[in-house]
Image: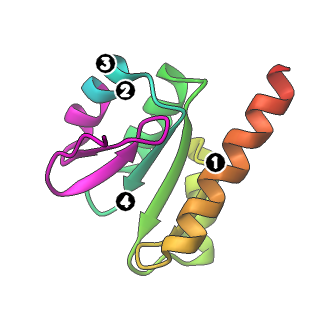
Amino acid sequence: MPTFYPDSFVITSMPFTLSVLPSELRELILRFRPDVVIVDMETASLTEVEQMHRDFTSVCIVCTHRIADEEMWTAALDAGAADICSATDTHGILAAAMRNTSLARSAAA
């Protein structure tokens, strides 16, 4: 059964865990060791994404924003995100998460 916390979210190996603040997200990553985290760029900065990428190298970071554009996409990728999607593009978010975790597992094999 999935575990839920209110507001924004993080994927933990397929059950879902929700978080609000980047500091809470870091705690959840340490606790649950997810393959993927989904970060709302309206609550986290590029600096925080970059720090998460450095601290959790095996975690795929997919960012979302309600008005993601090419400049933001480039900045997010430079910070270590695997992709950035519109916050309303559920299919794109899940596709990016699945694509990047599949690539990571293939490379590890």
Label 3 neighbour load within 10 Å: few <14, some 14-19, many 20+: few
Residue 78 disc label: 1
* Picture mark count: 4
Q: What coloring was used for the rendering?
A: rainbow
Q: Which residue is mark 2?
A: 29
Residue nearest the observer in this picture, 64 or 34: 34
Task: Label 3, secondary structure: give it.
Answer: helix
Label whose residue precedes the other's in the sequence (2 or 1): 2
Task: Label 4, secondary structure: give it.
Answer: loop
Q: What x and y, as percent, mark residue 28?
A: 29, 28
Callout in the foreground (2, 1): 2
Label whose residue precedes the other's in the sequence (2 or 4): 2
Which residue is found at the position 38% from the left and 78% from the top?
Answer: 66
Distance between the Cα atoms at labels 3 and 4?
22 Å
Quadrant containing the N terminus is top left
Residue nearest the observer in this picture, 67 or 15: 15
Circle 4: residue type: Met
Circle 1: residue type: Asp
Label whose residue precedes the other's in the sequence (3 or 4): 3
Residue nearest the observer in this picture, 94 or 66: 94
Callout in the foreground (3, 4): 3
Q: Which residue is mark 4?
A: 41
Label 4 neighbour load within 10 Å: few <14, some 14-19, many 20+: many
Q: Residue furthest front?
A: 1
Q: Which residue is mark 3?
A: 31
Label whose residue precedes the other's in the sequence (3 or 1): 3
Q: What x and y, as percent, mark residue 70?
A: 63, 75
Residue 100 in view of the camera: yes
Distance between the Cα atoms at labels 3 and 1?
26 Å
